[in-house]
Image (cartoon, helix red, strand yellow):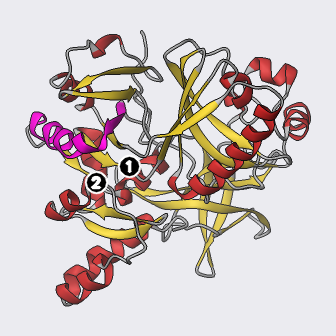
Amino acid sequence: MRGGLWQLGQSITRRLAQADKKAVARRYYSVDSELKKTVLYDFHVANGGKMVPFAGWSMPIQYKDSIMDSTVNCRDNGSLFDVSHMCGLSLKGKDSISFLEKLVIADVAGLAKGTGTLTVFTNEKGGAIDDSVITKVTDDHIYLVVNAGCRDKDLAHIEEHMKVFKSKGGDVSWHIHDERSLLALQGPLAAPTLQHLTKDDLSKFYFGDFRVLDINGSKCFLTRTGYTGEDGFEISVPSEHAVDLAKAILEKSEGKVRLTGLGARDSLRLEAGLCLYGNDMEQHISPVEAGLTWAIGKRRRAEGGFLGAEVILKQLETGPSIRRVGLISSGPPARSHSEIQNEKGENIGEVTSGGFSPCLKKNIAMGYVKSGLHKAGTKVKIAVRGKAYDGAITKMPFVPTKYYKPT
């Protein structure tokens, strides 16, 4: 679903308002027998979740409130997302760090125990296979989460390189956490709500930190991270306890934290200037072009040693030919593949994600333009349905991030 989550959600809302609701429900709620369901599927439906196919799963795109309202509520109060379609896995063994560093751009060895970072799996040409949040649990245990839509290719990629690594005597093994579910609790009420459910003090638990701790009576993997720009957590919980944990979180928030679907999640991450793989990152886009130079560890810049390092290190030295930028525009919201033009009407790039910002009440987008034309304030035209509208390149994030960091 390339950049269409927000649009699909709006389409569902309009159709439910204008058409025979039962007919529309059959069309959008019908679940193909091949679609996988998270353990929270029945819970979503019982709470008014509008289920749609996404990356091979039946997932809620929204609930009873609108995508606009859900987005704003996340920033004002909080949201609870089911992201169990994503794939969590552990790498273990004394060589697990050196193995992973062959595949990603991060300085994994340089991470403190119990901390993590965003990274990118790269291919031989320096392009992005996927982005992932990785955590160094210990020197011989790495925990990471990869995108649902990339699961099969990511696991095949890791397995292929693991076989070669192990054949040369490397000590690494893996476990895919299909026995666990993943919840994302985001927003200003995330920490105070979760604190009610654990004895561990969360006030000294900062952005990027990881712990294994008891939450609501269950052994969970807790990471202070998210995909909204807000403070929050991703909670890996044994699947048999996932529904109870979701209920407990909603109850402890006294109704202020709401179940939230993929539509608002897409709006939130766009407002935060975060990439969606398949839209803003692809196999042919490098981390440097995507504006993720900061994710390439200093040691890795000096030593390389990861797939595509030659291409990426050259881009760091000479600059990339294209760059990811933020955009604001007039007229209808820009969508994926909308053409970006200079003031003379000449093509200079393409939009990769776009929509109407529920929090800023204006059009926002991101895309790629030719280097040299990427400076904030540069005036552009954005073509939507054959007509060019005024726009400008702007810095990201569009909405300030509120990650919980030491003062």
The C terminus - image quarter = top left
- How many numbered discs sit on the rendered protein? 2
Residue 211 at what x, y percent from top left?
Answer: 39, 19
Q: Nearer the viewer, residue 154 or 70?
A: 154
Image height of 245 relative to 330, above or below = above
Image height of 379 relative to 290, above or below = below
Determine contact: label 1, label 2, CB under 8 Å: yes
Disc 2 element: loop
Residue 181 at what x, y percent from top left?
Answer: 35, 44
Q: Nearer the viewer, residue 325 or 42?
A: 42
- Whether residue 256 is visible to the viewer of this picture, yes or no, is no
Residue at image x 44%, y 32%? 401
Image height of 50 relative to 362, above or below = below
Q: What's the magenta bit mostly, secondary-structure-wise? A: helix
Residue 280 at what x, y percent from top left?
Answer: 63, 54
Residue 103 at what x, y percent from top left?
Answer: 74, 36
- Whether residue 178 is visible to the viewer of this picture, yes or no, is yes
Was residue 233 drawn as part of the magenta stretch in this picture?
A: yes
What residue sits right under mark 1 in the picture?
84
What residue sits right under mark 2 in the picture?
39
Was residue 1 drawn as part of the magenta stretch in this picture?
A: no
Specify the segment rendered in magenta: 232-253
User: In the image, which disc is placed on residue 214?
Assistant: none
Residue at image x 20%, y 43%? 246
Q: Amino acid at mark 2?
A: Val
Q: Nearer the viewer, residue 353 or 34?
A: 34
Q: Quadrant of residue 67?
A: bottom left
Crowding at dot 2, Cα within 10 Å, few <14 / some 14-19 / many 20+, comes out as: some
